[in-house]
Image: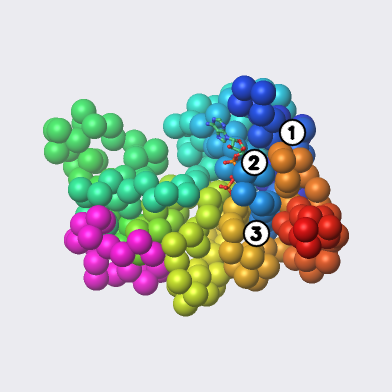
């Protein structure tokens, strides 16, 4: 199976600290791939490099949606969405003064042909585009089970719902790869279970590949087909959830060495 994302020899330091150290992994097109590791292992730094918030010290990141090949280093943070790469954040990043619907529609600006200037002229093309964006946003809200709250303020929604709205905003841009940074953080057990089902449904119905960083091991083991485990910025294991769970290096990274655990 073809890879949609190939990360080779990625390294990034903060001062003297190597947050990511010659990390390589690849994500198969259409898969749900997990990146896990103990606190401070470097997961968010990897995500920030891929989505171009950070400029890595070294490494190659190749993004291959459909028949295209892009070197991610050639793209700025606001441009990656135009080639099909979307992300969510550890702390929800919504525009709190806008409604749920408006937040979703904001995610579509990279797809719209009419710029802000043209919108001021109330041209038929602008009106048609806005109607299309609204319909698409409503379809996604329906898919996410959020129909009925579209005209409410995003800020007035419970945290779990705000996370779903953020997910919806990524979907509206027709991404080929969605990077989810701790989507279950702050969710209760029932919400996390529903999220697991939703992540699979998104992959299946939207034909999108998913790269997931998550601390909730139940969710990771349930949804990911392949997992890469990092510790101190280095890959220590990669494989299926079953293989990862049985890997002594992974157990040691999470629990510490036997003598340290019992010390
Ligand atoms: N902007 C920054 N400046 C300095 N150090 C940083 C910065 N961002 C991350 N670090 C350090 O880099 C290391 C990796 O951090 P990172 O946030 O990528 O880990 P993580 O695996 O995502 O952690 P967590 O699971 O706790 O979110 C940590 O030691 C962290 O303190």
Cβ atoms under marks 2 and 1 closer than 8 Å: yes
| Cα gap from disc 2 to disc 1, whole angstroms | 9 Å
- Mark with earlier residue (1, 3): 1
Determine the residue positioned at 47% across, 49% down. 90
Secondary structure beneath label 2: loop
The reply, left or right, for residue 153 in relation to residue 252 is left
Instruction: Determine if the magenta segment contains residue 65.
Output: no
| Cα gap from disc 1 to disc 3, whole angstroms | 23 Å
Is the CB–ligand 1 distance for label 3 below 8 Å?
A: no
- Determine whether 222 is above or below 91 in the image: below
The reply, left or right, for residue 212 in relation to residue 28 is left
> Residue 101, percent across and down?
26, 56
- First to last magenta residue range: 141-160
> Residue 183, percent across and down?
50, 58
> Residue 26, percent across and down?
74, 45
Determine the residue positioned at 47% across, 77% down. 190
Regarding ligand 1, which quadrant of the image does it lie in? Answer: top right
Chief secondary structure of the magenta portion = loop
> Residue 10, percent across and down?
71, 32
Residue under label 1: 21
- Mark with earlier residue (2, 1): 1
Residue under label 2: 42
- Mark 3 Cα-neighbour bin, 10 Å: few <14, some 14–19, many ≥20: many
Is the CB–ligand 1 distance for label 2 below 8 Å?
A: yes
Determine the residue positioned at 64% across, 41% down. 42
The reply, left or right, for residue 108 in relation to residue 89 is left
- Residue closest to the far bottom: 190
- Mark with earlier residue (2, 3): 3
Classify the position of the N terminus by image quarter: bottom right
- Residue closest to the far left: 121
């Amino acid at each position: 199976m073809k890879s949609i994302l190939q990360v080779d020899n990625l390294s990034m330091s903060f001062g003297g600290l190597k947050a990511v150290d010659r990390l390589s992994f690849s994500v198969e097109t259409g898969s749900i791939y997990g990146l896990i590791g103990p606190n401070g292992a470097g997961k968010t730094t990897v995500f920030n490099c891929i989505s171009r918030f950070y400029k890595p010290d070294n490494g190659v990141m190749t993004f291959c949606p459909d028949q295209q090949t892009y070197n991610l280093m050639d793209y700025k943070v606001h441009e990656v969405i135009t080639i099909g790469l979307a992300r969510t954040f550890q702390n929800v990043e919504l525009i709190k003064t806008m409604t749920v619907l408006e937040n979703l529609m904001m995610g579509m600006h990279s797809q719209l042909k009419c710029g802000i200037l043209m919108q001021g002229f109330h041209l038929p093309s602008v009106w048609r585009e806005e109607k299309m964006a609204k319909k698409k946003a409503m379809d996604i809200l329906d898919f996410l089970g959020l129909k009925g709250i579209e005209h409410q303020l995003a800020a007035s929604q419970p945290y779990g719902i705000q996370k779903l709205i953020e997910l919806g905003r990524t979907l509206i841009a027709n991404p080929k790869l969605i990077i989810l940074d701790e989507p279950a953080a702050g969710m209760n057990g029932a919400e996390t279970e529903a999220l697991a089902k939703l992540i699979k449904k998104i992959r299946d119905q939207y034909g999108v590949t998913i790269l997931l960083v998550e601390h909730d091991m139940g969710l990771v083991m349930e949804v990911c087909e392949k997992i890469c485990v990092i510790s101190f910025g280095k890959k220590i294991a990669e494989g299926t959830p079953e293989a990862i769970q049985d890997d002594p290096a992974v157990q040691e990274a999470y629990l510490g060495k036997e003598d340290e655990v019992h010390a």
